[in-house]
Amino acid sequence: MYGARLVACGYSQVPGVDFSENYSPVVNDITLRLLLIAKMVYGLQTKIIDVETAFLYGDLEEEIFMECPRGLEGVTDEHALQLYQCIYGLVQAARQYYKKFIKILKSIGFVGGDVDPCLLMQNNEKGLIYVAVYVDDNFLIGTNEAIEDTIASLRAKGLVLKETDNLDDYLSCQILFSNDGQSAWLGQPHLISKLQKKFGDQVSGKRSYKTPGTPGFHCIRNTDPDLALSKELHKDYRSGVGMLLYLVKYSRPDIANCVRELSKVLDSATGEAYNEMLRVIKFVLDTHDLGLRMIPTEGRDLPWVLVLYCDSDYAGDPDSRKSVSGYILFVRGVPVAWRSKAQRSVTLSSSEAEWISLSEAVKEIMFVLQLLGAMKIKVQLPVTVLVDNVGAIFMSSNVTTSSRTKHVDICTKYVRQYVEDGIVKIVFVRSESNRSDIMTKNVQGDLFDKHASHLVVPKHSQR
């Protein structure tokens, strides 16, 4: 049998005439990890529902005409079709579907969407349920009765759904729970298979490494045309770094810093950068069974505890002399947010670099606190922030007007506001115990193993 689908030529749509907005949000990766923690702590059930032919449900807000498809009887070149609902190919199809689906969810009793527009919840006599929306793939976590009632209500609204009980393929991730449901492993085997297929031959003869990145290595922008990669290798470089970035996003925070270094020269990579990328890929392939460590602390009715490790590498970029910020946020002992990123401006001291990194980390804390508030989950305050710089800790509790600090006034006020309100408590930690150290620099093997063990674990550990 053959099927046919009418598809619009979205490339011919005129902005401001045929569409005005086309952005459609998807669930935040931090939200997904918090939901998985809630599932383990509260003993909830999970299910994935896929809305079939999703983009046909959206209601159009513009008046759109299209040419009649060839083979349609009784029409001439003077005829045109007017669209009353979205079809595949329209620029705004994803956005209009999202608006329609959220509207349906709220009509059956769901609330939320203020912090993460793709996270909604409902708590009634059927029990508690959360829905995370990622285009047409929806992640449901809740009591079994609440899940079944939600699915029945969505079908009653005219949606055609396909249900999946296992979590072997959600956003290219595989999620495995232990037999007792108290811990989990999150990995991306599909993406690692793609890396193996694309780069396996290039790394097969390389030695194995204890760390993903060469200790002390920094990518430097190339200005010599003779050292530039060929067009084909440059394409492979961008493709490889893109896949590694997606690994960092969901399951491999241990390679965040070395991938950040590689991403600095996407438009000007050299053979040295390409070889470093192959080293990272070789490490990922050799450690393909590693995934995110999700072992929440026990205590169903206890408030959730948040701990954040924060660090910086002063003037770590040889080109711009910008410092590197890094942090890892643990919720009930599970890493839920991490970042390795160059700072926006050049700092004039290590304390200032730590302070800028701290301000970025506090912004992440506030986002997670708002998410947990939207999920109606109690949090233990203050949130502990561990920093290995005494100067940054001093600035968090004292107003100074010295020549070294008076130009960082905005960040100072932002962080100190939450310290004074009792939301954040900044505590000193020794550098060798700062788990975010691997987010700011490529470290030696023993130190890497020490910190990475808190972030990733082998797949077979979840049984």
Image (tube, rainbow, N blue to C red):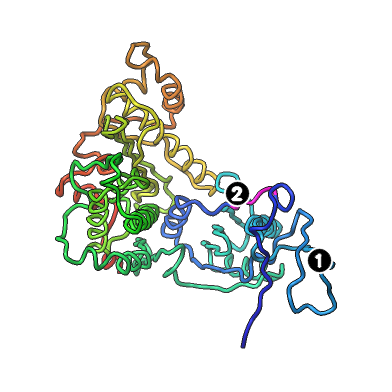
Foreground disc of the pair 2, 1: 1
Above or below: residue 24 compared with residue 460: above
Above or below: residue 329 compared with residue 69: above
The spot of residue 373 in percent (x, y) is: 53, 44
Kindly identify the amino acid type of the residue bearing the numbered disc 1: Ala
Q: Which residue is depicted at the point 28% across and 56% down? A: 456
In the displayed structure, does residue 335 sit left or right of residue 45? left
Q: Secondary structure at mark 2?
A: loop
Q: Is residue 208 visible?
A: yes
The spot of residue 416 in percent (x, y) is: 42, 24
Q: Secondary structure at mark 1?
A: strand
| Frontmost residue, 409 versus 140 | 409
Confirm whether the magenta stretch covers residue 21.
yes
Kindly identify the amino acid type of the residue bearing the numbered disc 2: Gly
Q: Name the residue beneath numbered marker 1.
A: 80
| Frontmost residue, 420 versus 265 | 265
Confirm whether the magenta stretch covers residue 40.
no
In the displayed structure, does residue 438 sit left or right of residue 381? left
Q: Which residue is depicted at the point 34% across and 59% down? A: 232
In the displayed structure, does residue 110 sit left or right of residue 164? right
Q: Quadrant of residue 286?
A: bottom left
10 Å neighbourhood of mark 1: few (<14), some, or many (≥20)?
A: few
The spot of residue 323 in percent (x, y) is: 31, 32
Q: Determine the residue located farthest toward the bottom in the rendered image.
A: 1
The spot of residue 406 in percent (x, y) is: 39, 14
Q: Name the residue beneath numbered marker 2.
A: 113
